[in-house]
Image: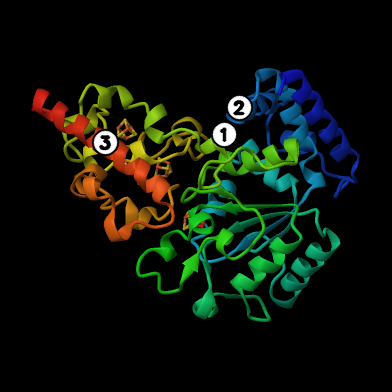
Amino acid sequence: MENSTLFKQLSSRLDKLANLPKLDDEKSISKLIEEKGFSRRDFMGWAGAMTSMLMLPASFTPLVAKAAEVADRLPLVWLHMAECTGCSESLLRSATPTIDSLIFDYISLEYHETIMAASGWQAEHNLEHAMEKYKGKYILMVEGGIPHGESDFYLTVGAHGKTGEKHAIEASENAAAIFAIGTCSSFGGVQAAAPNPTNATALSNVTNKPVINVPGCPPSESNIVGTLLHFILYGTLPALDVYNRPKWAYGLRIHDNCERRGRFDAGEFVQQFGDAGAKDAYCLYKVGCKGPYTFNNCARQKFNQGTSWPVQSGHGCMGCSEPDFWDKMGIVHEPLGNRLYHTAFGGLGSDATADKIGVGLITVTAVGIAAHAAISAIKNPKV
Ligand code: FSX
Ligand code: SF4
Ligand code: F3S
Protein backbone atom coordinates (compact mmCIF):
# COMPACT_ATOMS: atom_id res chain seq x y z
CA MET A 1 0.00 0.00 0.00
CA GLU A 2 1.21 3.51 -0.82
CA ASN A 3 2.34 5.46 2.21
CA SER A 4 -0.13 8.29 1.55
CA THR A 5 -3.06 5.86 1.34
CA LEU A 6 -1.97 4.18 4.55
CA PHE A 7 -1.55 7.56 6.24
CA LYS A 8 -5.13 8.52 5.33
CA GLN A 9 -6.45 5.16 6.45
CA LEU A 10 -4.76 5.34 9.84
CA SER A 11 -5.76 9.01 10.31
CA SER A 12 -9.40 8.26 9.71
CA ARG A 13 -9.31 5.36 12.20
CA LEU A 14 -7.75 7.65 14.82
CA ASP A 15 -10.37 10.33 14.14
CA LYS A 16 -13.10 7.79 14.76
CA LEU A 17 -11.48 6.68 18.01
CA ALA A 18 -11.05 10.31 19.09
CA ASN A 19 -14.81 10.78 18.74
CA LEU A 20 -15.53 8.00 21.21
CA PRO A 21 -16.21 9.24 24.73
CA LYS A 22 -13.16 9.71 26.93
CA LEU A 23 -13.27 7.30 29.83
CA ASP A 24 -12.09 10.01 32.20
CA ASP A 25 -12.55 13.66 31.19
CA GLU A 26 -10.02 14.83 33.74
CA LYS A 27 -7.21 12.85 32.20
CA SER A 28 -5.21 13.70 29.11
CA ILE A 29 -1.91 12.40 27.87
CA SER A 30 -0.37 15.87 27.78
CA LYS A 31 -1.35 16.52 31.41
CA LEU A 32 0.03 13.18 32.49
CA ILE A 33 3.28 13.73 30.66
CA GLU A 34 3.74 17.12 32.21
CA GLU A 35 2.95 15.82 35.69
CA LYS A 36 5.65 13.18 35.36
CA GLY A 37 8.21 15.73 34.27
CA PHE A 38 8.37 15.02 30.55
CA SER A 39 8.25 17.74 27.93
CA ARG A 40 6.25 17.70 24.70
CA ARG A 41 9.59 17.28 22.99
CA ASP A 42 10.33 14.10 25.01
CA PHE A 43 6.91 12.80 24.05
CA MET A 44 7.45 13.47 20.34
CA GLY A 45 10.91 11.87 20.59
CA TRP A 46 9.27 8.80 22.09
CA ALA A 47 6.61 8.79 19.36
CA GLY A 48 9.36 8.98 16.73
CA ALA A 49 11.16 5.98 18.23
CA MET A 50 7.87 4.04 18.36
CA THR A 51 7.17 4.92 14.74
CA SER A 52 10.48 3.50 13.64
CA MET A 53 10.02 0.41 15.83
CA LEU A 54 6.65 -0.22 14.16
CA MET A 55 8.43 0.07 10.82
CA LEU A 56 6.51 3.13 9.70
CA PRO A 57 8.09 6.11 7.94
CA ALA A 58 9.16 9.04 10.16
CA SER A 59 6.35 11.17 8.67
CA PHE A 60 3.88 8.94 10.59
CA THR A 61 5.20 10.19 13.97
CA PRO A 62 2.23 12.56 14.58
CA LEU A 63 -0.11 9.60 14.02
CA VAL A 64 1.68 7.51 16.63
CA ALA A 65 1.51 10.46 19.03
CA LYS A 66 -2.21 10.71 18.35
CA ALA A 67 -2.64 6.96 18.86
CA ALA A 68 -1.17 7.45 22.35
CA GLU A 69 -3.55 10.37 22.93
CA VAL A 70 -6.62 8.30 22.10
CA ALA A 71 -5.37 5.16 23.89
CA ASP A 72 -7.81 5.88 26.74
CA ARG A 73 -10.78 5.23 24.42
CA LEU A 74 -10.05 1.49 24.38
CA PRO A 75 -10.73 -0.53 27.49
CA LEU A 76 -8.16 -3.15 28.40
CA VAL A 77 -8.60 -6.32 30.40
CA TRP A 78 -5.37 -7.97 31.59
CA LEU A 79 -5.56 -11.48 33.06
CA HIS A 80 -2.90 -13.31 35.04
CA MET A 81 -2.44 -17.07 34.73
CA ALA A 82 0.53 -19.20 35.85
CA GLU A 83 3.60 -16.97 35.72
CA CYS A 84 5.98 -14.78 37.70
CA THR A 85 4.33 -11.41 36.86
CA GLY A 86 7.58 -10.39 35.19
CA CYS A 87 5.66 -9.20 32.12
CA SER A 88 3.70 -6.68 34.20
CA GLU A 89 6.87 -5.80 36.10
CA SER A 90 8.67 -5.16 32.84
CA LEU A 91 6.08 -2.58 32.01
CA LEU A 92 5.19 -1.03 35.32
CA ARG A 93 7.94 -1.42 37.85
CA SER A 94 10.63 0.94 36.67
CA ALA A 95 12.25 3.32 39.14
CA THR A 96 11.62 6.22 36.82
CA PRO A 97 8.47 5.86 34.75
CA THR A 98 9.02 5.79 31.03
CA ILE A 99 6.55 7.17 28.54
CA ASP A 100 5.80 3.50 27.73
CA SER A 101 4.63 2.89 31.28
CA LEU A 102 2.68 6.18 31.28
CA ILE A 103 0.59 4.88 28.41
CA PHE A 104 -0.54 2.10 30.73
CA ASP A 105 -1.42 4.63 33.42
CA TYR A 106 -3.45 6.46 30.85
CA ILE A 107 -5.26 3.64 29.12
CA SER A 108 -8.49 2.43 30.60
CA LEU A 109 -7.20 -0.58 32.45
CA GLU A 110 -10.49 -2.15 33.48
CA TYR A 111 -9.00 -5.16 35.20
CA HIS A 112 -5.43 -6.01 36.20
CA GLU A 113 -4.88 -8.12 39.30
CA THR A 114 -1.46 -6.70 40.15
CA ILE A 115 -2.43 -3.07 40.27
CA MET A 116 -6.15 -2.85 40.95
CA ALA A 117 -7.35 -1.93 44.41
CA ALA A 118 -10.34 -4.29 44.42
CA SER A 119 -10.10 -7.85 45.66
CA GLY A 120 -12.31 -10.89 46.19
CA TRP A 121 -15.95 -10.66 45.13
CA GLN A 122 -15.55 -7.02 44.12
CA ALA A 123 -12.68 -7.82 41.75
CA GLU A 124 -14.61 -10.60 40.10
CA HIS A 125 -17.62 -8.38 39.77
CA ASN A 126 -15.48 -5.66 38.13
CA LEU A 127 -14.21 -8.15 35.57
CA GLU A 128 -17.69 -9.41 34.71
CA HIS A 129 -18.98 -5.86 34.52
CA ALA A 130 -16.16 -4.73 32.19
CA MET A 131 -16.64 -7.71 29.89
CA GLU A 132 -20.37 -7.03 29.67
CA LYS A 133 -20.16 -3.24 29.33
CA TYR A 134 -17.43 -3.35 26.67
CA LYS A 135 -18.56 -6.51 24.91
CA GLY A 136 -16.76 -6.82 21.58
CA LYS A 137 -14.73 -3.67 22.27
CA TYR A 138 -12.13 -4.48 24.88
CA ILE A 139 -8.55 -5.51 24.26
CA LEU A 140 -7.57 -8.65 26.12
CA MET A 141 -4.02 -9.20 27.27
CA VAL A 142 -3.26 -12.46 29.01
CA GLU A 143 -0.06 -13.13 30.92
CA GLY A 144 0.95 -16.64 31.98
CA GLY A 145 0.65 -20.24 30.91
CA ILE A 146 -2.71 -21.93 31.36
CA PRO A 147 -3.00 -25.22 33.25
CA HIS A 148 -5.70 -27.16 31.46
CA GLY A 149 -7.40 -30.47 30.93
CA GLU A 150 -7.41 -32.71 33.97
CA SER A 151 -5.06 -30.44 35.87
CA ASP A 152 -6.79 -27.10 35.37
CA PHE A 153 -7.41 -26.93 39.11
CA TYR A 154 -3.74 -26.10 39.54
CA LEU A 155 -4.94 -22.61 38.82
CA THR A 156 -8.10 -21.14 40.22
CA VAL A 157 -8.71 -17.42 40.38
CA GLY A 158 -11.02 -15.27 42.45
CA ALA A 159 -13.72 -15.72 45.00
CA HIS A 160 -15.61 -18.36 43.01
CA GLY A 161 -12.50 -20.45 42.50
CA LYS A 162 -13.02 -20.42 38.75
CA THR A 163 -10.20 -22.07 36.82
CA GLY A 164 -7.73 -19.92 34.93
CA GLU A 165 -8.66 -21.75 31.76
CA LYS A 166 -12.34 -20.84 32.17
CA HIS A 167 -11.43 -17.20 32.85
CA ALA A 168 -9.28 -17.08 29.71
CA ILE A 169 -11.90 -18.71 27.51
CA GLU A 170 -14.69 -16.44 28.74
CA ALA A 171 -12.66 -13.26 28.39
CA SER A 172 -11.54 -14.27 24.88
CA GLU A 173 -15.11 -14.77 23.73
CA ASN A 174 -16.00 -11.08 23.23
CA ALA A 175 -12.63 -9.35 22.99
CA ALA A 176 -11.86 -7.04 20.06
CA ALA A 177 -8.30 -8.34 19.97
CA ILE A 178 -6.37 -10.88 22.03
CA PHE A 179 -2.70 -10.67 22.91
CA ALA A 180 -0.70 -13.34 24.72
CA ILE A 181 1.83 -11.26 26.64
CA GLY A 182 5.02 -13.13 27.48
CA THR A 183 6.37 -16.54 26.58
CA CYS A 184 4.18 -18.32 29.15
CA SER A 185 0.96 -17.15 27.59
CA SER A 186 2.34 -17.40 24.05
CA PHE A 187 3.84 -20.89 24.31
CA GLY A 188 3.36 -22.29 27.83
CA GLY A 189 6.68 -20.98 29.13
CA VAL A 190 8.60 -22.19 32.14
CA GLN A 191 5.70 -24.02 33.77
CA ALA A 192 5.15 -25.99 30.56
CA ALA A 193 8.77 -27.22 30.67
CA ALA A 194 9.11 -31.00 30.91
CA PRO A 195 7.58 -32.77 32.74
CA ASN A 196 4.95 -30.02 32.79
CA PRO A 197 3.15 -31.20 35.94
CA THR A 198 0.32 -28.70 35.60
CA ASN A 199 -0.26 -29.41 31.91
CA ALA A 200 0.29 -25.71 31.26
CA THR A 201 -0.23 -24.55 27.73
CA ALA A 202 -0.44 -21.51 25.46
CA LEU A 203 -3.50 -19.25 25.39
CA SER A 204 -3.94 -20.14 21.71
CA ASN A 205 -4.52 -23.77 22.75
CA VAL A 206 -7.50 -22.98 24.94
CA THR A 207 -9.37 -20.46 22.80
CA ASN A 208 -10.47 -20.75 19.21
CA LYS A 209 -10.13 -16.97 18.70
CA PRO A 210 -7.07 -15.53 16.95
CA VAL A 211 -4.25 -14.79 19.39
CA ILE A 212 -1.23 -12.58 18.72
CA ASN A 213 1.82 -13.74 20.62
CA VAL A 214 4.14 -11.20 22.22
CA PRO A 215 6.72 -13.52 23.76
CA GLY A 216 9.80 -12.87 25.85
CA CYS A 217 10.35 -13.82 29.48
CA PRO A 218 9.54 -11.01 29.93
CA PRO A 219 8.87 -9.05 26.75
CA SER A 220 10.28 -5.53 26.76
CA GLU A 221 7.97 -2.69 27.75
CA SER A 222 8.31 -1.28 24.25
CA ASN A 223 7.10 -4.50 22.63
CA ILE A 224 4.06 -4.53 24.91
CA VAL A 225 3.22 -0.88 24.29
CA GLY A 226 4.08 -1.18 20.58
CA THR A 227 1.57 -4.01 20.32
CA LEU A 228 -1.09 -1.84 21.84
CA LEU A 229 -0.27 1.17 19.66
CA HIS A 230 -0.22 -0.98 16.55
CA PHE A 231 -3.75 -2.14 17.31
CA ILE A 232 -4.92 1.40 18.03
CA LEU A 233 -3.45 2.57 14.73
CA TYR A 234 -4.59 -0.24 12.47
CA GLY A 235 -7.48 -1.98 14.22
CA THR A 236 -6.33 -5.15 12.49
CA LEU A 237 -3.83 -7.89 13.15
CA PRO A 238 -0.20 -7.12 12.30
CA ALA A 239 1.83 -9.22 9.86
CA LEU A 240 2.76 -12.35 11.81
CA ASP A 241 5.47 -14.98 11.64
CA VAL A 242 4.98 -18.74 11.84
CA TYR A 243 4.52 -18.51 15.63
CA ASN A 244 1.98 -15.66 15.38
CA ARG A 245 4.49 -13.07 16.56
CA PRO A 246 4.30 -9.57 15.05
CA LYS A 247 7.02 -9.30 12.44
CA TRP A 248 7.79 -5.70 13.34
CA ALA A 249 9.18 -6.96 16.65
CA TYR A 250 10.19 -10.55 15.98
CA GLY A 251 11.21 -10.42 12.32
CA LEU A 252 14.97 -10.54 12.91
CA ARG A 253 17.27 -12.68 15.00
CA ILE A 254 19.02 -11.28 18.10
CA HIS A 255 22.25 -12.16 16.26
CA ASP A 256 21.31 -9.88 13.32
CA ASN A 257 21.45 -6.68 15.38
CA CYS A 258 23.83 -7.70 18.14
CA GLU A 259 26.56 -5.21 19.04
CA ARG A 260 28.99 -8.15 19.42
CA ARG A 261 28.33 -9.45 15.92
CA GLY A 262 31.65 -8.09 14.64
CA ARG A 263 33.37 -10.20 17.32
CA PHE A 264 31.47 -13.26 16.18
CA ASP A 265 32.41 -12.70 12.55
CA ALA A 266 36.04 -12.21 13.54
CA GLY A 267 35.98 -15.44 15.54
CA GLU A 268 36.57 -13.66 18.86
CA PHE A 269 34.75 -15.63 21.53
CA VAL A 270 34.48 -15.51 25.30
CA GLN A 271 35.67 -18.99 26.35
CA GLN A 272 34.55 -18.68 29.95
CA PHE A 273 32.92 -15.96 32.01
CA GLY A 274 35.46 -13.56 33.48
CA ASP A 275 38.23 -14.22 30.95
CA ALA A 276 40.03 -11.51 29.00
CA GLY A 277 37.59 -11.87 26.07
CA ALA A 278 34.65 -11.30 28.42
CA LYS A 279 36.22 -8.06 29.58
CA ASP A 280 36.67 -6.99 25.95
CA ALA A 281 33.04 -7.72 25.06
CA TYR A 282 33.80 -10.71 22.80
CA CYS A 283 30.97 -12.80 21.39
CA LEU A 284 29.12 -14.97 23.92
CA TYR A 285 28.26 -17.86 21.61
CA LYS A 286 30.63 -20.34 23.26
CA VAL A 287 29.25 -19.58 26.70
CA GLY A 288 25.80 -20.38 25.51
CA CYS A 289 24.36 -17.38 23.65
CA LYS A 290 21.26 -18.49 21.70
CA GLY A 291 21.03 -15.20 19.80
CA PRO A 292 21.56 -16.88 16.42
CA TYR A 293 18.34 -18.89 16.85
CA THR A 294 16.16 -16.34 18.63
CA PHE A 295 13.83 -13.86 16.99
CA ASN A 296 13.38 -10.64 18.97
CA ASN A 297 14.41 -6.99 18.91
CA CYS A 298 16.13 -6.79 22.33
CA ALA A 299 19.38 -5.48 20.87
CA ARG A 300 17.54 -2.41 19.59
CA GLN A 301 14.82 -1.87 22.16
CA LYS A 302 16.60 -3.03 25.31
CA PHE A 303 15.06 -3.10 28.82
CA ASN A 304 14.84 -0.88 31.91
CA GLN A 305 14.29 2.41 30.14
CA GLY A 306 16.50 1.31 27.27
CA THR A 307 19.58 0.99 29.47
CA SER A 308 20.70 -2.56 28.71
CA TRP A 309 19.84 -6.05 27.53
CA PRO A 310 21.24 -9.52 28.29
CA VAL A 311 24.18 -9.51 25.84
CA GLN A 312 25.19 -5.96 26.76
CA SER A 313 25.34 -7.01 30.40
CA GLY A 314 27.67 -9.88 29.51
CA HIS A 315 25.31 -12.87 29.46
CA GLY A 316 24.20 -14.67 26.31
CA CYS A 317 20.65 -14.69 25.08
CA MET A 318 18.71 -17.66 26.51
CA GLY A 319 16.23 -17.75 23.65
CA CYS A 320 13.42 -16.58 25.91
CA SER A 321 11.07 -15.53 23.10
CA GLU A 322 11.15 -18.94 21.40
CA PRO A 323 8.63 -21.73 21.97
CA ASP A 324 9.74 -24.24 24.64
CA PHE A 325 13.06 -22.49 25.13
CA TRP A 326 13.56 -24.18 28.50
CA ASP A 327 13.58 -27.59 26.85
CA LYS A 328 14.81 -26.84 23.35
CA MET A 329 17.52 -24.26 23.82
CA GLY A 330 19.54 -26.71 25.87
CA ILE A 331 21.96 -26.02 28.66
CA VAL A 332 22.10 -22.30 29.34
CA HIS A 333 25.88 -21.88 29.24
CA GLU A 334 26.60 -24.27 26.39
CA PRO A 335 26.37 -23.53 22.68
CA LEU A 336 23.30 -25.08 21.12
CA GLY A 337 25.42 -26.21 18.18
CA ASN A 338 27.20 -28.72 20.42
CA ARG A 339 23.97 -30.65 20.83
CA LEU A 340 22.46 -30.19 17.42
CA TYR A 341 25.63 -31.39 15.72
CA HIS A 342 24.79 -34.92 16.83
CA THR A 343 21.25 -34.82 15.63
CA ALA A 344 21.55 -32.70 12.49
CA PHE A 345 21.46 -35.57 10.02
CA GLY A 346 18.67 -37.48 11.69
CA GLY A 347 16.60 -34.37 12.50
CA LEU A 348 15.54 -34.07 16.10
CA GLY A 349 14.23 -37.63 16.18
CA SER A 350 11.46 -38.40 18.58
CA ASP A 351 11.66 -34.87 19.98
CA ALA A 352 10.31 -33.35 16.79
CA THR A 353 6.98 -31.69 17.49
CA ALA A 354 4.38 -29.48 15.87
CA ASP A 355 6.79 -26.58 15.54
CA LYS A 356 9.10 -28.64 13.39
CA ILE A 357 9.44 -25.75 10.98
CA GLY A 358 11.17 -23.58 13.55
CA VAL A 359 13.24 -26.46 14.82
CA GLY A 360 14.20 -27.35 11.25
CA LEU A 361 15.42 -23.83 10.68
CA ILE A 362 17.32 -23.90 13.92
CA THR A 363 18.97 -27.20 12.98
CA VAL A 364 20.29 -25.91 9.67
CA THR A 365 21.37 -22.57 11.14
CA ALA A 366 22.93 -24.24 14.15
CA VAL A 367 25.15 -26.39 11.99
CA GLY A 368 26.40 -23.29 10.14
CA ILE A 369 26.94 -21.29 13.32
CA ALA A 370 28.67 -24.13 15.12
CA ALA A 371 30.86 -24.78 12.09
CA HIS A 372 31.87 -21.10 12.03
CA ALA A 373 32.76 -21.22 15.71
CA ALA A 374 34.75 -24.44 15.25
CA ILE A 375 36.63 -23.18 12.18
CA SER A 376 37.47 -19.84 13.78
CA ALA A 377 38.85 -21.72 16.79
CA ILE A 378 41.25 -23.55 14.46
CA LYS A 379 42.27 -20.33 12.73
CA ASN A 380 42.55 -18.41 15.95
CA PRO A 381 43.33 -20.93 18.69
CA LYS A 382 43.86 -18.28 21.37
CA VAL A 383 40.30 -17.05 21.42
FE1 FSX B 1 7.29 -14.14 34.08
FE2 FSX B 1 5.10 -13.18 32.54
FE3 FSX B 1 8.38 -14.99 32.05
FE4 FSX B 1 6.07 -15.76 31.95
O1 FSX B 1 6.54 -13.04 31.97
S1 FSX B 1 8.89 -13.01 32.95
S2 FSX B 1 7.52 -16.34 33.68
S3 FSX B 1 7.07 -14.93 30.22
O2 FSX B 1 4.37 -14.80 31.97
O3 FSX B 1 5.59 -13.14 34.25
FE1 SF4 C 1 25.73 -11.54 19.81
FE2 SF4 C 1 25.18 -13.92 20.74
FE3 SF4 C 1 25.41 -13.54 18.12
FE4 SF4 C 1 27.54 -13.47 19.68
S1 SF4 C 1 26.23 -15.26 19.28
S2 SF4 C 1 27.03 -12.03 18.07
S3 SF4 C 1 26.76 -12.52 21.54
S4 SF4 C 1 23.85 -12.69 19.44
FE1 F3S D 1 15.24 -12.99 25.91
FE2 F3S D 1 17.36 -13.27 24.44
FE3 F3S D 1 16.13 -10.99 24.52
S1 F3S D 1 17.04 -14.13 26.44
S2 F3S D 1 15.40 -10.92 26.59
S3 F3S D 1 15.32 -12.88 23.71
S4 F3S D 1 18.31 -11.30 24.42
The amino acid type, in three-letter code, at marker 2 is Met
For residue 31, side relative to residue 45 (left or right): right
Q: Which residue is mark 1?
A: 248
Q: Which residue is mark 3?
A: 284
Q: In this view of the protein, which residue sits in the foreground, 246 or 297?
A: 246
Quadrant that contains the C terminus: top left
The location of residue 86, given as percent across then percent down, is 50, 54
The amino acid type, in three-letter code, at marker 3 is Leu
How packed mark 1 is, by other alpha carbons closer than 10 Å (few <14, some 14-19, many 20 or more), is: many
Residue 315 showing in the rendered view: no
Q: Can you tell me which quadrant of the image ligand 3 is in? A: top left
Q: Nearer the viewer, mark 2 or mark 3?
A: 2
**Residue contact between numbered discs 1 and 2, judged by CB atoms under 8 Å:** yes
Q: Which residue is mark 2?
A: 55
Q: Which circle marks residue 218 in the picture?
A: none
How packed mark 2 is, by other alpha carbons closer than 10 Å (few <14, some 14-19, many 20 or more), is: few
How packed mark 3 is, by other alpha carbons closer than 10 Å (few <14, some 14-19, many 20 or more), is: many
